[in-house]
Image: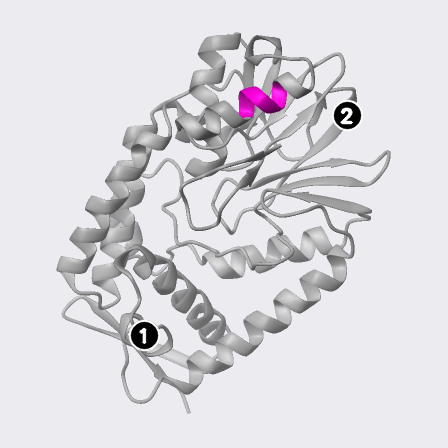
Amino acid sequence: MSLPSPFAIGDINAYLLLGDCVTLVDTGPRSKDTRQALEQGLADNGLSISDIDLVVLTHQHYDHVGLAGEIWERSGAQVGAIGPLASFMADLNTSMDIDDAYASAMMVRHGCDPEISASLREMLGAFRRFATDVEVEVSFKDQDRVRMGSRDFVVLTRPGHSPTDTIFYDPSDRTLLAGDHLLQHVSSNPIAHAPVGITDPAAVACSPDRPRALMTYLDSLRDTQAMDVEVVLPGHGVPFTGHAALIDQREEMHARRAQKILSQINGKRTASDIAAKLWKRLPISQTYLALSETLGHIDILVDQGVVGHSVDDGVVRWHTTD
């Protein structure tokens, strides 16, 4: 079911699996238009909200989890997700406070104007109306099997786009419910999210061991590429085949972007400086996505040994090592 969302990515796909365990995979954001579209999609299949037995969530973003709490209240359905996502959803406001504080610390750490960071944080706060807390009663872990509809799916964790990305694989016909892990017409942005469960986001943002979202995402893609998949059912866009070739294209694209970013590192440059060169006239709402993208590719260059950094007055500046 294609459900409307107010976000730039557009409509989100929710999947309804019919059978002895009527299952909804992802819910769309909490909004009137999404709710109406979901109810109509269910009615087209002779169902209502109260007929849902299980709601399964693929990852933590509002456009995929927003209505889960409301559906849980109206239907009595159980909600299923991997453990870290269960923790994230149990107290969504606190989880988002931590995530927003992490993003703010990352922006200041990497050279963004503190006023832009503050404005973005205020803007992100307005998005919270699109989701509510929900109790996840069925907690999955990697390699678990879960009954959805009349099928048995294998649960596979694939962090990178977010820390909680999860895909579900039916080996009987090689169908993959992929969420936002792999999309056909757009590359999923590996967003620099706070690790789930941390209590000091600023300290993690400034740590040498901060998460490397893009490198994690590429590792996840390689794990998916090795799978025997016939069709991918994505979180946005139409179903597609040829996942292995698409992942090759994604790897090549990220390699090219890394080289483009390398060409922008002349002297000592902050990640914010580099992002501003690559994306001119960037709206504030996209600032952190651009910073995440830039840092992800810098992490690749650091791993290759061609880029290093210094820290001056708490701000990280990058330089080439040759």
Q: Is residue 261 above or below residue 58?
A: below
Is residue 34 found left or right of 243 in the rendered image? left
Callout 1, which amino acid? Lys
| Crowding at mark 2 (Cα within 10 Å: few <14, some 14-19, many 20+) | some
At 78% from the left and 24% from the top, the residue drawn is 151
Q: Which residues are magenta?
A: 38-42
Seen as rendered, the residue at the extreme right is 172
- Measure the C-alpha gap from mark 1 to mark 2: 47 Å
Query: What kind of secondary structure does the magenta stretch mostly adopt?
Result: helix
Looking at the picture, how far across and down is residue 21, in whole percent? 70, 14
| Residue 199 seen by the camera | no
Looking at the picture, how far across and down is residue 26, in whole percent? 55, 30
Give SS at disc 1.
loop
N-term mark: 1 or 2: 2
Q: Nearer the viewer, mark 1 or mark 2?
A: 1
Quadrant in the picture for the N terminus? top right
Instruction: Quickly name the residue at label 1.
Output: 280
Instruction: Quickly name the residue at label 2.
Output: 152
Picture quadrant where residue 13 is located: top right
Give SS at disc 2.
strand
Quadrant in the picture for the C terminus? bottom left
Say the numbered circle drawn on residue 110.
none
Residue 64 within the segment the image draws in magenta: no
Q: Is residue 2 above or below residue 114?
A: above
Callout 2, which amino acid? Asp
